[in-house]
Amino acid sequence: MSTAMNFGQKSFKPRPPDKGSFPLDHEGECKIFKEKFMECLRKHHSDNNKCRQQSMEYLRCRMDRDLMTKEPLRKLGYGDIDSTKERNS
């Protein structure tokens, strides 16, 4: 009979990752942005470089609705996209 002895073991306290995981959009608030991004990927055979504008808009939507941590877009790799295009696509 084997029993696990866990006297003195530290308890594991999970915490969410800093980046890379975020809540699902259960209400579909950013669905249209996601659809545009996915359509772009299909059109360009998964070449995400050609869909950066759409992916930026999707992330902006998520940040605006508190579905992910707000960060400057330049820190997420979008510093080279003209800010006037950010809202107009």
Image: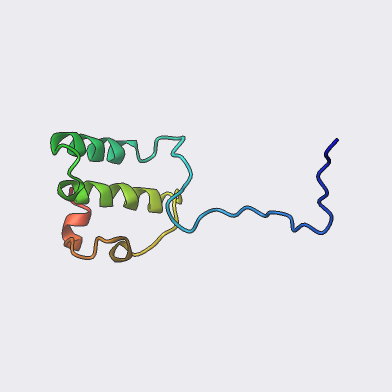
Please state if 89 lies on the left or on the right of 19 as rendered.
left
Residue 15 position, x and y percent, is: 59, 55
Please state if 59 lies on the left or on the right of 40 as rendered.
right
Quarter of the figure with residue 1? top right
Q: Residue at x 31, y 46 (%)?
A: 58
Residue 61 position, x and y percent, is: 34, 48
Instruction: Note whether 84 is above or below 58 in the view shown.
Output: below
Quarter of the figure with residue 70? bottom left
Instruction: Note whether 49 is above or below 24 in the view shown.
Output: below
Please state if 13 lies on the left or on the right of 70 as rendered.
right
Between 71 and 12, the one nearer to me in the picture: 12
Instruction: Note whether 88 is above or below 33 in the view shown.
Output: below
Q: Residue at x 74, y 58 (%)?
A: 10
Between 33 and 17, the one nearer to me in the picture: 17
By what rule are the colours in the image chosen?
Answer: rainbow
Between 49 and 60, the one nearer to me in the picture: 49
Tell me how many marks there are. Answer: 0
Q: Residue at x 18, y 39 (%)?
A: 40
